[in-house]
Amino acid sequence: MPSDTDAGRRAPRRDAAENREALLTAAAAALAASPDASLEAIAADAGLSRRSVYGHFANRDELILALIDRGAARFNAVAAGVDHHDASVALALLGTRLWHAIVHVRLLARIALREPYVERVADAVAPVRARLGELVARGAADGTVRSDIRPPVLARLIEEAAIAVLVEAAAHELDDEEGRRLVMLAVLGTAGLSWREAGALIAANPELSREASE
Amino acid sequence: MPSDTDAGRRAPRRDAAENREALLTAAAAALAASPDASLEAIAADAGLSRRSVYGHFANRDELILALIDRGAARFNAVAAGVDHHDASVALALLGTRLWHAIVHVRLLARIALREPYVERVADAVAPVRARLGELVARGAADGTVRSDIRPPVLARLIEEAAIAVLVEAAAHELDDEEGRRLVMLAVLGTAGLSWREAGALIAANPELSREASE
DNA sequence: CATAACTTGCACACCGACGTGCAACTTAGT
DNA sequence: ACTAAGTTGCACGTCGGTGTGCAAGTTATG
């Protein structure tokens, strides 16, 4: 008895949920490649017909919104567990975590370029941004991060630098090892550390290296 | 007598050339804002009707290609005159020059996102990329630039970092002063200098500060 | 195995944008 | 003032994509 209200109704089929997932996955891939991929293309990728997309989503827009929320959730979850008394280490750590979520990051970055969704993505991603802002502010205050750029601006620059690496990584396929290292170096460099300092910091904090899990 | 071949033909009207310019300018603005602005919108911006666009360009594509070539020309010209025995200074200098060409940079960056034009933009911009590559390689060799990232990759990262600042600058309008400073700091930070080193380098090289001309 | 849940294919209307032909108009140059 | 260069508006066909209705299938599940 699934519920009181839908008495006579049968439970939804399990494979429907799977197809919905397949659609989201296909859409993520297609939209990351080209932000205005057609429903036709997406459905085909998911192994469905265009017609049956409408059995899962009211329209194109709802599909994309679902995608945004899904990506952002993953994204924010990743950022939530990041902390360290040294702000620069925390930033590097955030970088490596982002590397694991690279697919989501790239997708959101692409979607956010299209006019109607900019705001929506910004809202969905607000938590990560907030966290990043905190870390930068703290670092600027205690001297672990540069203080020649206003913290809010610096936070944006670090964000952009990280995204740039992640996007770049897609073109020339880097292995996990190098990708994570690059994100950290880009973040730390933008944060004001010299490349030797950044290297030393990574070497001194093994938790930055052994993130092979997951 | 304009030429021998077009004997009976009258010289083209001067205002036609002006309108062509107006179209390009309007298109640059419109496409930078939204990379799939309609010809209708562009023409209106330029004070013309959609119909007469076809008097200047065979089709939408040719308009965009003209735009790419025009932007890239400006862009490459800017990069050509950049050099300095210290590679990191040269990079910073390139940064400030790019700041002056910010409009073109942003436009090309946007257009390059659209599938059919990626390659074309890459070709058009090849000279700047080449120059950047040289500088990075030289800097890595003589120790003025970080050597923990392969030079070709580092060149891409620096490029992305600079573009990120330029794009970011559009949102929150920065004055000339701060914009140029930010581009330089982002470039130098990515190149491996600490923020204090970057500050010192800028202070020590007045040509990086007095670029108010043009 | 009965049946609701789901998928499919096709038809259709709709929309925005592109590109073109043409006739009438306005305007710069000589 | 004559005239070619340039602009305009409108009509038209085309194309690709969206969203919907419906009838006929297929398949998971109770």
Image: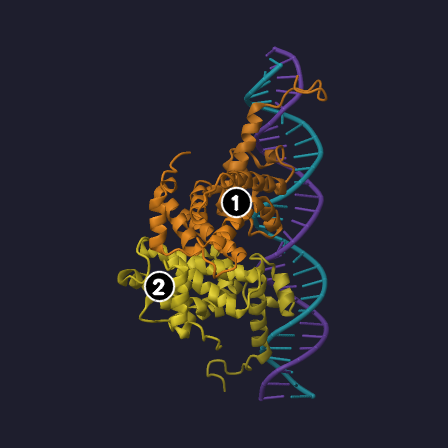
Chain colours: A orange, B yellow, C purple, D cyan
Q: Residue at x 40, y 48 (%)?
A: A184
Along the viewing direction, whichever of C6 and A70 lies nearer the viewer: A70
Residue A31 is labelled as 1
- In what element is the residue under mark 2? helix
Disc 2 chain ID: B
Q: Which amino acid type is shown beneath numbered disc 1?
A: Leu
Task: Judge the density around disc 1: few (<14), some (14-19), many (≥20) Cα neighbours within 10 Å.
Answer: many
Q: Could one spot residue A11 in this view of the protein? A: yes
- The residue pinned by badge 2 equals B130
Q: CA distance from mark 2 to mark 1?
A: 31 Å
Image-based side of B16 in relation to A168, left or right: right
Instruction: Determine whether, in the image, residue C12 is placed left or right of residue A121.
Output: right
Residue extending farthest front? A142
Residue B195 image offset from top left, x and y in percent: 41, 60
Chain that bears disc 1: A
Give x and y (percent) for residue A64.
59, 42
Counting from the top left corner in percent of width and height, residue A169 is at 40, 48
Quadrant of the rendered image containing residue B15: bottom right
Left or right: B86 in relation to B98: left
The reply to the same-chain question for discs 2 and 1 is no
In this rendering, would A196 be left or right of C23?
left
Q: Amino acid at mark 2?
A: Ala
| Label 2 CA crowd tier, 10 Å (few <14, some 14–19, many 20+) | few
Above or below: residue B39 compared with residue A187: below
The dot on residue B211 is none
